[in-house]
Amino acid sequence: MPGVLSQQTIKRSVNYSGVGLHSGNRVTLTLLPAPPGHGIRFRRVDLEARPEIEARIENVVDTQRSTTLGKGSVRIHTVEHVLAALSGCGVDNVIVELDANEPPIGDGSAREYCKLIHAAGLQPQEAPRQVYAVTEPLAIQLGDSFMHLVPAPEFRISCTSADRSGHHTQFFSLVVTPESWERELAHARTFCFFEEIEYLIKNGLIKGGSLENAIVIRDDAVLTTEPLRYPEEFVRHKMLDIVGDLALLGRPILGHLLAVRPSHTANCELVRQLDARYRRATPLGFGPPAAEIPCSETVSSNSSHDVVLDACALDIQEIMKLIPHRYPFLLVDRIAVLEENRIVGVKNVTINEPFFQGHFPGHPVFPGVLQLEAIAQVAGVLMRRKFADKPQIAYFMSAEEVKWRKPVWPGDTLVVEVDLLKARGKVGKARGQCKVRGEVVSEAVVTFMLMDA
């Protein structure tokens, strides 16, 4: 939490078993210590290669009824309660291992995860904690959900929850610290309305749900196996979810969040906008990131999935038949679109890129010159396909109108769009743009020549 100056992990590994709320799968979750700067990562030990997914907003793939992380075909559902416990207790760096696709739901709150963290113990680390201090208001509205984040010297949530009938409107406000988190929010259980149950079952959800791990509201009646734990348990659980979803920013927040009828979709959109603010205010590769995020716009978002992320015109094996670049200098993983005079490539940026060791230690930024090289490589693929009569190599000759607009970070997916402007003989000229989540991060006009291999 913001009051702690150094990063923290856990002292030892601990585990907990149960069933997933929506999947109904039996699952064991294990928390493992992690080094400074590692962040929170989920690891699927039931899958070959034990793939990992960082708990970052760019990896959120679904927010209907819960928050789901994904990379490629790998999914981890309902991560918000685990993230809330880790964030609320002040854990910055940890590996969360799972042998199924969803953490145990426990009793529907974060209580069991808090117990797990206490059993493991907290271990301070010799690295400063980077805090996001809000300096300008940010407001978003998505349907019935309204989120307004304003500057404050601590992290406070003031939340109103309400059903459509208005029978169960509740309000609660809290300065969130490790102590207040566990005392006032961590034990609040998830809930649903009776009329939603049929829909949820028909859509393959709540397979592991029961009155042991959820409260059911039917008209004015509250169905539960024990008395309500708080007078405002429903809104407090909404705040628990907010703490978990805001952890996807990757750093604690200093600010006051006023939320009305929050949802996972609205929570994650707020984080997405905060993440964009941070990136806009960060130097583009000439030094460590700035600590402040000056921006004052009010955002009404309508974000959508970029279809090119699922398309494949050429895979990596086909790309390597066309251009000679190899690790660690091959900067395109897949060609998503390939037309007569247009091409779109995709580069998945991971923390394993060798240049991040020195660019910059503790503040990894994808070098702008390598974005330019990615444009040239994608353009080279297009030229090689147009003139594929004999083996040739596309040599980079010049770059004009080069602009670097926003930083690119580990976990980003770089979409490289190139349009061929002209091709005379063996010389080609093209305009290229690198984008992340639809926003241009760099652009240039490049000239190259095909030479015999």
Image (spheres, grey):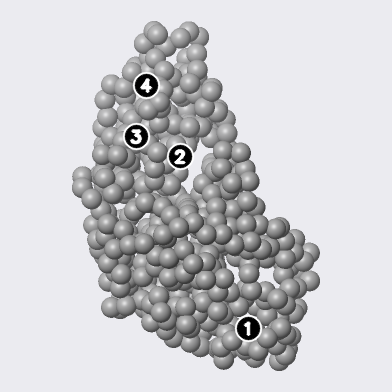
* Sequence-first disc among 1 and 2: 1
| Viewport quadrant of the N terminus | bottom left
Q: In this rendering, which labeled residue sits more in front, label 2 or label 3?
A: 3
- Cα distance between the residues tagged 4 and 1: 60 Å
Q: Are marks 1 and 2 in contact (CB under 8 Å)?
A: no
- Residue 138 visible at all: yes
Question: Badge 1 is on which residue?
Answer: 163
Residue under the image location 58 percent in, 58 percent down: 29
- Cα distance between the residues tagged 2 and 3: 14 Å
Question: Badge 2 is on which residue?
Answer: 348
Residue under the image location 26 percent in, 60 percent down: 128
- Residue 267 visible at all: no
Q: Is residue 70 above or below residue 291?
A: above
Along the line of sight, the residue nearer the viewer: 42 or 196: 42
- Cα distance between the residues tagged 1 and 2: 41 Å
Residue under the image location 51 percent in, 77 percent down: 186
* Sequence-first disc among 2 and 3: 2
